[in-house]
Image (tube, rainbow, N blue to C red):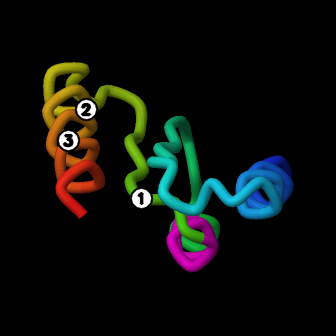
Amino acid sequence: MALFPEVIAGLSARGMENVLIVAGGIISREDRDMLYDLGVDAIYGPGSSLQDIAVYIKAAIQKIRDK
């Protein structure tokens, strides 16, 4: 959790607001809400299907490209 604010600020400072940010791991409900507020697009916990993650990323990237 500690690194996400820095990463997001660094992306923003470089004009990279349209970068897809996906988090994973054991993340508390409070931290999840904070990450979404910071701009994280999706959070996947342990046991998440790699296929589901890949489908989400492909769809999200297509949505960004279509803007």
Q: Magenta includes 53?
A: no
* Residue 24 coordinates in the image, percent (x, y): 50, 37
Left or right: 34 in relation to 45: right
* Residue 45 coordinates in the image, percent (x, y): 41, 40
* Residue 20 coordinates in the image, percent (x, y): 45, 48
- Which residues, given as a range, are shown in magenta? 32-38
Write the residue at 54% across / 36% down.
25
- According to the picture, the residue beneath numbered tag 2 turns out to be 53
Q: Nearer the viewer, residue 46 or 14?
A: 14
- According to the picture, the residue beneath numbered tag 3 turns out to be 56
Amino acid carrying label 1: it is: Asp
* Residue 21 coordinates in the image, percent (x, y): 51, 48
Judged from the image, the secondary structure of the residue bearing numbered disc 1 is loop
Among the two numbered marks 1 and 3 on one chain, the one whose residue lies closer to the N terminus: 1
Q: CA distance from mark 1 to mark 2?
A: 12 Å
Q: Confirm or deny contact between disc 1 and disc 2 (CB under 8 A).
A: no
Q: Confirm or deny contact between disc 3 and disc 2 (CB under 8 A).
A: yes
Q: CA distance from mark 1 to mark 3?
A: 10 Å
Q: CA distance from mark 3 to mark 2?
A: 5 Å
Left or right: 17 in relation to 9: left
Amino acid carrying label 2: it is: Ile
Crowdedness near tag 3: few (<14), some (14–19) or many (≥20) residues, C-alpha within 10 Å: some
Among the two numbered marks 1 and 2 on one chain, the one whose residue lies closer to the N terminus: 1
**Can you tell which mark lies on residue 4?**
none
- According to the picture, the residue beneath numbered tag 1 turns out to be 41
Give the vertical position of 59 relative to 18 (above or below).
above
Instruction: Label the magenta part by its dominant secondary structure.
Output: helix
Judged from the image, the secondary structure of the residue bearing numbered disc 3 is helix
